[in-house]
Image (cartoon, rainbow, N blue to C red):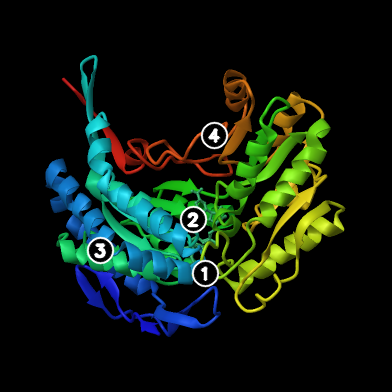
Amino acid sequence: MDVRDTLYINGQWVASTGEGVLEVVDSTTEEVLATIPNGSVDDVDRAVKAASEAFPAWAAKSRDERVALVTKIGEHLAMRMEKIGELISHEVGMPMGLSVPVQAGLPVGAFTDLAQHVAEFTWEEEIGNSLVIREPIGVVGAITPWNYPLYQIALKVAPALVTGCTVVLKPSEVAPLNAFELAEVIDEVGLPAGVFNLVTGVGPIVGEAIAAHPLVDAVSFTGSTRAGKRVMQVGAETVKRVNLELGGKSANIILEDADIATAVGTGVFACFLNSGQTCSALTRMIVPRSKLAEVEEVAAAAAAGFPAGDPFGEGVMVGPLVSAVQRDRVRGFIQTGIDEGAKLLIGGPDAPEGLEKGFFIQPTVFSEVTADMTIAREEIFGPVLSIIPVDSEEEAIAVANDSPYGLAGSVWSGDPAHAEDVARQIRTGQVDINGGPFNVSAPFGGYKQSGNGRERGKFGLDEFLETKSLQR
Ligand code: NDP
């Protein structure tokens, strides 16, 4: 078992003043993998003061110098990719074959690709007699979730550092070990003391202390809509900037003229990736009623191809859920789907055969789901797909938009221009057209209650900048 008994504050590994420790549990074996400090309000205060003191000198460095250091962080993370992928497979349950490129590879890219985005960004512009300049906002509090733990961290820490901000990070208590790897790397590459600080602990204590601290200028939060609302309320007291990347219930609209086999097959995996624990998962498949029988057949066959299994097993694509809490929650939603009258095509609330230990769930597909059912409305965060039949394209668009969320989506049509026209009518931050691939540089974020910021690429720099006008 790994014992992490220090926090990274002001360039030093120091003891926490918090009481007790937090246990990190292996999602497959249910055994305790590690313990971490249960940080305190006092730890946050020390970290924020260190970040505040480090800010002027860090902001005064040239952008090139900061870009070079941030790129080096990515290069050093790359040397640990296998280890980080493995750690996250234990913590979160994503199969190793995916975890190394996704959970470890994407964060590496978030650090190493920044030079290009910094070069593309407009740092100064003339407007009439004004010179408009962009300056770092100051001390950034980063609060992150467990599902893509290091990537969510990297999407905040890398752009914050490059713009000249200093950072206090509170990672998820459920999957925090990768954050310790990052702190070690940052120590290795020699970032000045106080520029990056790590405080582990629980959201209501460490997270709220960050959101409340008067010396924190901006909070960048990724997580549930529930916790995001709380962070916004707490941050309002000091009128700090609060950027939120929250949950989703994304729609996959398959139109009459789409290639059903490809659209449905791709859509099933887009729902099941990371055991459905993806904020942008396409969990509502909206299909023409006339095609329902064909859709059901393809969906059930595709889902049968992704049985849950040991994330370290050969060829496994769907592992366990992250925790017992999450497993029980998802099972509850599956039972609710059955109780409310949805048609269960494959899966169900019981543990998959032979996988009673570990937080496993059967990948599940429901059909004949109506837009008012619980499973069509709530973010389940598990491998549960709802197929919703509709009678027209207008109804498909209306159902897609009938959600408090607005994070992602997808449209399939034999006519790409028509698919694009439909995509423009969907009120979400991203829409994939005919399986358009994931783009790490495209802005990502939500409409409505899915949040209010944009991360990634050059758009991800904005979150950490103030704007100043000089009149001449
Ligand atoms: P949570 O909201 O439970 O936790 C996210 C982070 O917030 C954790 O670090 C958590 O601490 C902390 N937190 C919890 N309560 C508070 C509080 N009162 N004040 C301050 N911080 C708090 O989300 P999960 O970790 O369960 O992640 C899943 C959610 O994240 C899903 O809803 C998902 O959709 C969303 N998400 C959104 C993404 C996006 O980009 N839009 C990307 C990935 C996930 P603790 O360690 O104690 O849990």
- Dot 1: element: loop
Image point (20%, 16%), residue name: 129
Q: Mark 1 points at which residue?
A: 313
Badge 3 amino acid: Lys
- Dot 2: element: helix
Please state which of the two labelled residues, at mark 3 or mark 4, is closer to the viewer: 4
Query: What residue occupies the far front of the structure in this picture?
Result: 314
Q: Nearer the viewer, residue 86 or 314?
A: 314
Q: In this view, does 367 lie to the left or right of 221?
A: right
Disc 4 residue crowd, few under 14, some 14–19, many 20+, Cα 10 Å: some
CA–CA distance in space, label 3 to label 2? 20 Å
Q: Name the residue under label 3.
A: 49
Badge 4 amino acid: Asp
The answer to whether the residue bearing label 2 lies less than 8 angstroms from the nearest atom of ligand 1 is yes
Please state which of the two labelled residues, at mark 4 or mark 1, is closer to the viewer: 1
CA–CA distance in space, label 2 to label 4? 30 Å
